[in-house]
Amino acid sequence: MNEYEIKKEICDIGKRIYNKGMVAANDGNISVKLNDHEFLCTPTGVSKGFMTPEYICKVDENGKVLQANGSFRPSSEIKMHMRVYRERPDVNAVVHAHPMYATSFAIAGIPLTQPIMPEAVIALGCVPIAEYGTPSTEEIPDAVSKYVQHFDSVLLANHGALTFSDSLLNAYFKMESTEFYAQLLYQAKLLGGPKELSEEQVQRLYEIRRQFGLKGKHPADLCPNTKAGKPSCHNCGGNCSHAGASENADLVASITKKVMEQLGL
Ligand code: 13P
């Protein structure tokens, strides 16, 4: 894809997140990595549902403007995007939105950790909540940084959701999956509470994920319990550290434990 086509794709995804009600008014932002020193991003303060390729700005790895038409300036959240690219070299696109259900969970302080449907378990695993930060400051990048190595989807406390992946379409799909998972969980709670998948069912789904060789980070890939054939992530209750056999597994276990603690598990 050439640069113009990528700009058109950003506009396309902008329309989708706007038309699906994942953002209101001028909310949300999208970026795509062209190479280590050039990134395309949506401009600040415009509706992402009405953009044309001329709106899209180009920045360097520090978020400094390389190219912007007229009065367009890069998203006020560009630091958050750049932090993800810096810390996750496998990521080529980042999407930030405020979808109704996912953001409601982020406001209520409830991470998405219940294994309730196969697709969410396979695609996302758990979705943690990064601590609240003031938009446009380093507070949000700092908060997100704690989770970025272990997850591809993170809720932002009292704010919204952030997803990232190897392509813009996949980053967008992760946003869709996050919102769908949150919506199902919300509705199931209204119906008396979800019946969670069993440990064994979750393990079988993790195995499918491994067999498919799906890209990105996933809590199931981290847990040394998984490698030892024991329950992981959704079901281990934060006891991953008991299974560490090697030095590496111990390190992974301590990281997992910290993440689990932050998730309140
Ligand atoms: P920008 O228009 O500056 O990208 O900001 C929108 C937003 O949602 C901030 O969180």
Image (spheres, rainbow, N blue to C red):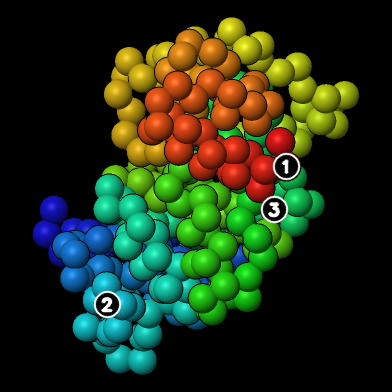
Marks 2,3: beta carbons within 8 A: no
Give percent across and percent down for residue 205.
49, 15
Give the Cα distance between marks 1 and 2.
37 Å
Q: Residue at x 25, y 61 (%)?
A: 33
Residue type at mark 2 is Val
Does the beta carbon of the residue at mark 2 sit less than 8 Å from ligand 1? no
Say which of marks 3 and 1 sits in front. 1
Question: Circle 3 — which element?
Answer: helix
Give percent across and percent down for residue 43.
39, 77
Give percent across and percent down for residue 48.
45, 67
Q: Residue at x 12, y 59 (%)?
A: 2
Marks 1,2: beta carbons within 8 A: no
Question: Circle 1 — which element?
Answer: loop
Instruction: Please state if 178 lies on the left or on the right of 235 as rendered.
Output: left
Visible residue check, residue 184 = no
Q: Earlier in the sequence, mark 3 or mark 1?
A: 3
Q: Residue at x 30, y 83 (%)?
A: 64
Q: Is residue 27 above or below residue 192?
A: below
Does the beta carbon of the residue at mark 3 sit less than 8 Å from ligand 1? no
The part of the image, by quadrant, that contains residue 135 is bottom right
Q: Which residue is mark 1?
A: 264
Q: Which residue is mark 2?
A: 59
Q: Earlier in the sequence, mark 1 or mark 2?
A: 2
Residue type at mark 3 is Ala
Label ID, residue 221: none
The part of the image, by quadrant, that contains residue 193 is top right
Label ID, residue 106: 3
Question: Circle 2 — which element?
Answer: strand
Residue type at mark 1 is Gly
> For the view shown, which residue lies furthest in the left direction?
2
Visible residue check, residue 186 = yes
Q: Is residue 264 above or below residue 2?
A: above
